[in-house]
Image: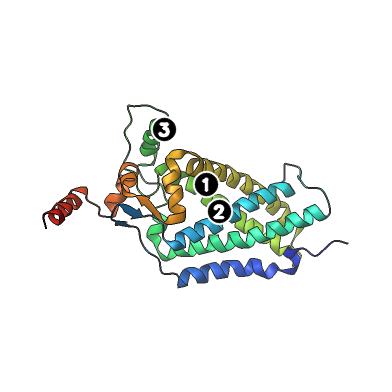
Amino acid sequence: MQKELLFDSATWLVWLAPFVGVLAAGLTKRKDPVVEGDRVLRHDKAAILEHWAHGIGTAVLLVSGIALGVWFLPALVGNGEPVWTMMDIHFGAVVVFLFGTFYYGANTLLAKKRFREHLPTKDAIEYTKRHYGLLLGFKKFTMPPERKYFESEKMAYILALASTVAIIVTGLFKVAAHSVDLPAGLMTVMTPAHDIATVAMLAFFVAHVFFAAVLPMSWPVLRSMFTGYVNLEYAKHEHAGWLAELGYSEKETAGADSEDSAA
């Protein structure tokens, strides 16, 4: 006998998760980046929470979704209990993903500068060329004065944003189909669209993990997703533009240190 899926018995959690995320954002007091001695606050606690809720939710969604099979690939799990179990895992990931994503989205809308700092600027092409030129060992390039996020990250952000929106919209239609009858023609569009968005998200996610966690040069930023801070010297070298936006002046700091020593 087939057990009842969580998508059928606990659908309300899927609709509640976005509301809780938005409510949590409204109740959260954010802390902006600031230079504190020899370190720089890059991510406050809210940023860390929304990042890991969205990231872990996305990772489990991708694994369970691919295991269940996408439009153009066969399922990796057989019929019966394995499929039901994977569907319930997918359900749990949906709830976590929606909370993290809507928490992030509401936080971003409440402070528009957080959204703008993710978007590519007029320097996107030039900075990306110089950045990857350095990574590839071309000595003619110098490190561009990158802001909080690399311009290459910002361009990838557009793909992540588009695929996330597509996954949420199509996914909610798929969830609704467990409770109400939807036109077959509509679901014929929504299902492959959901799968295509999943592949796009997978491409971004793999690249993000590689450049943000595997490459040693990214480890200081990876640590900041746990501690909130990056070393000041690292920020000077990799994110000079960001420090300038924070009003940091090495000359002024040096002058203050000299006064303290004289006192």
Residue position marked by numbered label 1 in the rendering: 159
Q: Is residue 219 left or right of residue 1?
A: left
User: x%, y% of residue 128?
Assistant: 40, 37
Q: Which image quadrant for residue 240?
A: top left
Foreground mark, 3 or 1?
Answer: 3
Q: Which image quadrant for residue 72?
A: top right
Residue 139 appears in view = yes
Residue position marked by numbered label 3 in the rendering: 135
Q: Is residue 4 left or right of residue 47?
A: right
**Helix, strand or loop under label 2:** helix
Q: Which image quadrant for residue 218?
A: top left
User: x%, y% of residue 120?
Assistant: 40, 47
Q: Judge whether 210 appears above or below 11 on screen.
A: above
Picture quarter with the C terminus: bottom left
| Mark 1 neighbour class, 10 Å CA radius: few under 14, some 14 to 19, many 20 or more | some
Going from N to C along the chain, the mark reached first, 1 or 2, is: 2
